[in-house]
């Protein structure tokens, strides 16, 4: 039989104690004539199950042989002899160390750590073994590995090991032979060394693996899962399983990685040889990349170019205007520069209000202007304007303070009186007089307030990256940023006063500051009035509150009359019991068709922590009964408004407001990527797609399949990747995942959950977890990690492979790539979208929301 790797085996694989094997085409193949049938073969042939089908799929990917029947050795319990196929020789699965630690440089680092840890006795104790070999975050697992390797060499673990013995351990752990690593793993499970694994031994290793992978929930079900393994691998109830039975599943799972390595190598080789013509010449490569950049960013380019042109035009206009005035003869080019900078300040102080007029922007997003104006970049443009204001302020101030003021003071009296006397009331000022004047005082106050506000708006302060001593620590965090930003209202008042009392312009209608500001200020004032009106009208009733593991608060609210929104939008929440002034934005997680409104709030700062504690009091009875604490819940607690004596804090909402994800329907395919709580805007999209699927199914059931042409327009397929580091996170949206699994019969939605706290597939620390996961999902259709019907992957996704697969599966399509999460992934996803848009016929359009 040909093996998947290209080698050949003269005998088929051993069945799982009676399970049938699978040939390359997926058909069932009984053991060949002349070979002994394992016990229970006939009985199991008559009991087909989902699990057996799943195991057969694993077995079909590898070539193995049945255990030899040797006189004096029980069937299945002796040595196993195999033909080495190319898949086996390239197998890197069931690793005890990561790829970096297992290299030659890795041993040098281990040797160095050994010397540091064994200075006194020259021996490495068991407690330090994990840290020494690079398994410091899996001390319990490393300890068991130490005991196993010591037992194989008749070494007393309590006495420690020498460097030579550590070298032997290292050589065995990094052995490229799969059988060697499998034997170590089996011996770890086989505590008494009798060559047989009992249910209790399997249970202990499951608990150990769960602990190493930070899977607290799985530990509590270890007995159930060990029983599941025994049930499937020991159908004859012998009370034990042997190494070849354990191998059948492990080998199938880890060997699946081999083709990926080969594919990666082949792809890399092709990438070097099949470079498009337009990238071969340095000049052509530069031109092509420039054109690609312009094509991708043309909206931003034309808008920024227009803004820069307006600033330059105003500066030149004012510069030339003052060059022909009498003040130029006293202060020279300094006054021209100061007035030119002041003119750009007027424009930018007006424009900076527009990107934060959220209601206006939300309305404009749905108009034709969204095709030429990048409304998704409103906050970035707001920051650019703030930077321009800072530059203009510095130029204007320095030009006055270091040049204009000294020249005014030192100007000969007769010349000053002749040229500028009427502007200063025929009294030549001193330097202190200029600073103490109305323009001087208001200018100084504006600089102080803007410096304070701009500093607290920086990432290091707003995100509490900087750690300040008490009581200055209150200056870091979102609250400080929020309150400091509202001080800028005083700057606008001071700016109008400053411009009214300037010395060189006396006619009121030539003092143009108010003309620049009037329209944007009115827009912003209307925004604030609308928010106040909504606050009175959008007092919502809380229907249900839930506190999930990972410090996440879920609020289900009664939808206010007239509250219409699109999936992907967000709203602001205010709780007067926490703060009577603060509003905080959160993505809407309910679908437009739902009869309620929901948000999921991650505890990240002072305000969210206090809000969670307030709602936590409503769940106090449930928390107490489950012996959990409000500081760090390991279970989900829920409070319902229908329950007697449940009184929730008062909550107000404002919105909805537009976000990049709201325009998802204009794409053929969706790629939704959420990092942790960043999944929230996409849950609403998935619910909306699911509601459409249900609606279409209902219509088809009534009117027949001919109604298919009237289905709602929108994406034909959605791929959702949710990456999180805590197992409890999956509880947040377990209901949605199960709904997708139950109702999406057309496979419109494809969900991929990734848990980064679990070691990647092929690591020995997660091997048994992966086996249990496969068995449980095949038997009951439920994932052991998430508790839902969607299977969880371990470690992080291979994003390049994700984009490559989508480009191959959906040629000539427009794929909307929506990412929400921390900025860590933004650049990688953006670069991949750009790369695959340039090198394939698929166009990836990247949008992001960072928090």
Image: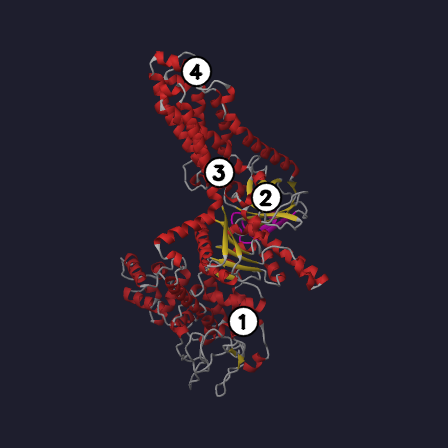
Which element carries disc 3, helix, strand or loop? helix
Nearer to us in this view, 61 or 718 = 718
Mark closest to the chain's N terminus, 2 or 4: 2
Q: SS class of the residue under badge 4?
A: helix
Determine crowd level at label 2: few under 14, some 14-19, many 20+ residues with C-alpha closer than 10 A: few
Separation of disc 3 and disc 2 at Cα?
21 Å
- State how far apart marks 3 and 1 are (Cα): 54 Å
Q: What's the magenta region?
A: 611-640
> Label for residue 382?
3
Name the side, left or right, on which 389 lies relative to 173.
right
Can you name the residue that lies furthest to the bottom here?
Answer: 34
Residue 201 is a magenta residue: no
* First in sequence: mark 3 vs mark 4: 3
747 in relation to 676, above or below: below
Q: Are marks 2 and 4 in contact (CB under 8 Å)?
A: no
Question: Which badge, 1 or 2, is on the more N-terminal residue?
Answer: 1
Residue hosting label 1: 54
Residue 487 at what x, y percent from top left?
A: 50, 30
Residues under labels 1 and 2: Cα distance?
A: 51 Å
Question: Viewer-proximal residue, 168 or 343?
Answer: 343
Q: In this view, does 206 lie above or below 195?
A: above
How would you rate the neighbour count of disc 1 (Cα within 10 Å): few for under 14, some for 14-19, many for 20 or more?
some
Q: Percent x, y for residue 491?
A: 48, 28
Left or right, 322 with reference to 372: left
Residue 423: which disc?
4
Say if 187 sits above or below 365 in the image: below
- Residue 367 is labelled as 2
Query: Which mark is first along the chain, 1 or 3?
Result: 1
Q: Is mark 1 on a helix, strand or loop?
A: helix
């Amino acid at each position: 039989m040909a093996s998947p790797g290209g080698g050949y085996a003269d005998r088929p694989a051993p069945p799982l104690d009676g399970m049938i094997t699978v040939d390359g085409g997926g058909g069932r193949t009984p053991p060949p004539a002349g070979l002994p049938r394992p016990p229970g073969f006939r009985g199991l042939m008559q009991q087909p199950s989902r699990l057996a089908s799943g195991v057969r799929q694993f077995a079909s990917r590898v070539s193995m042989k049945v255990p030899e029947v040797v006189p004096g050795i029980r069937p299945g319990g002796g040595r196993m002899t195999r033909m080495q196929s190319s898949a086996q020789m390239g197998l890197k699965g069931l690793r005890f160390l990561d790829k970096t630690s297992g290299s030659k440089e890795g041993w040098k680092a281990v040797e160095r750590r050994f010397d540091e840890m064994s200075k006194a006795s020259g021996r490495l104790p068991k407690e330090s073994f994990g840290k020494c070999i690079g398994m410091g975050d899996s001390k319990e697992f490393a300890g068991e590995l130490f005991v196993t390797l010591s037992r194989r060499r008749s070494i007393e673990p309590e006495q420690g090991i020498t460097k030579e013995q550590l070298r032997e351990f290292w050589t065995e752990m990094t052995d490229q032979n799969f059988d060697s690593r499998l034997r170590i793993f089996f011996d770890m499970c086989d505590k008494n060394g009798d060559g047989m694994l009992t249910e209790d031994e399997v249970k202990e290793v499951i608990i150990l693996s769960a602990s190493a992978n930070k899977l607290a929930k799985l530990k509590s079900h270890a007995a159930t899962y060990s029983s599941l393994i025994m049930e499937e691998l020991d159908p004859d109830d012998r009370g034990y399983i042997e190494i070849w039975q354990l191998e059948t599943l492990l080998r199938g799972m880890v060997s699946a990685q081999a083709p990926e390595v080969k594919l990666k190598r082949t792809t890399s080789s092709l990438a070097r040889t099949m470079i498009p013509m337009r990238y071969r010449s340095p000049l052509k490569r530069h031109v092509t990349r420039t054109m690609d950049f312009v094509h991708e960013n043309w909206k931003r380019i034309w808008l920024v170019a227009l803004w820069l042109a307006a600033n330059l035009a105003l500066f030149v206009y004012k510069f030339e205007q003052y060059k022909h005035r009498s003040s130029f003869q006293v202060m020279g080019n300094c006054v021209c520069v100061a007035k030119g900078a002041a003119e750009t300040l007027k424009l930018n102080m007006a424009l900076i209000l527009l990107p934060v007029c959220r209601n206006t922007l939300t309305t404009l997003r749905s108009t034709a202007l969204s095709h030429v104006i990048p409304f998704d970049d409103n906050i970035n443009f707001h920051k650019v304007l703030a930077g321009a204001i800072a530059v203009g302020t510095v130029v204007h101030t320095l030009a006055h303070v270091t040049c204009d003021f000294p020249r005014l003071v030192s100007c000969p009296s007769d010349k000053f009186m002749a040229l500028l006397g009427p502007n200063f009331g025929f009294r030549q000022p001193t330097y202190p007089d200029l600073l103490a004047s109305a323009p001087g005082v208001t200018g100084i106050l504006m600089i102080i307030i803007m410096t304070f506000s701009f500093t607290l708006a920086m990432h290091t302060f707003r995100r509490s990256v900087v750690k300040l001593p008490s009581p200055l620590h209150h200056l870091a965090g979102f609250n400080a940023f929020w309150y400091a930003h509202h001080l800028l209202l005083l700057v606008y008042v001071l700016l109008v006063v400053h411009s009214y009392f300037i010395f060189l312009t006396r006619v009121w209608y030539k003092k143009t500051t108010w003309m620049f500001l009037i329209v944007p200020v009115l827009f912003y004032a209307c925004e604030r009035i609308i928010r106040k009106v909504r606050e009175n009208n959008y007092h919502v009733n809380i229907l249900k509150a839930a506190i999930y593991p990972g410090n996440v608060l879920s609020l289900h609210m009664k939808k206010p009359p007239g509250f219409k929104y699109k999936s992907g939008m967000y709203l602001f929440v205010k709780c007067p019991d926490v703060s009577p002034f603060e509003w905080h934005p959160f993505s809407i997680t309910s679908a437009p068709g739902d009869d309620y409104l929901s948000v999921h709030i991650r505890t990240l700062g002072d305000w969210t922590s206090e809000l969670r504690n307030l709602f936590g009091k409503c769940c106090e009875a449930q928390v107490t009964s489950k012996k959990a604490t409000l500081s760090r819940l390991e279970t989900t607690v829920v409070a319902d408004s229908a329950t007697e004596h449940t009184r929730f804090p008062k909550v107000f909402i404002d919105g909805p407001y537009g976000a990049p994800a709201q325009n998802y329907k204009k794409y053929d395919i969706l790629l939704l990527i959420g990092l942790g709580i960043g999944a929230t805007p996409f849950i609403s999209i998935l619910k909306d797609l699911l509601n459409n699927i249900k609606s279409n199914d209902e219509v088809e059931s009534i009117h027949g399949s001919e109604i298919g042409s009237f289905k709602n327009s929108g994406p034909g397929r959605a791929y959702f990747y949710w990456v999180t580091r805590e197992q409890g996170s999956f509880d947040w949206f377990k209901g949605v995942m199960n709904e997708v699994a139950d109702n999406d019969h057309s496979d419109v939605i494809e969900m991929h959950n990734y848990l980064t706290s679990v070691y990647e597939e092929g690591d020995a620390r997660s091997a048994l977890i992966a086996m249990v996961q496969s068995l449980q999902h095949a038997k009951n259709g439920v994932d052991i990690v998430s508790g839902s019907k969607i299977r969880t992957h371990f470690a992080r996704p291979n994003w390049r492979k994700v984009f490559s697969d989508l480009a191959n599966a959906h040629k000539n399509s427009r794929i909307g790539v929506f990412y929400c999460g921390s900025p860590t992934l933004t650049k990688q996803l953006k670069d991949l979208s750009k790369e695959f848009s340039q090198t394939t016929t698929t166009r990836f359009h990247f949008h992001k929301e960072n928090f």
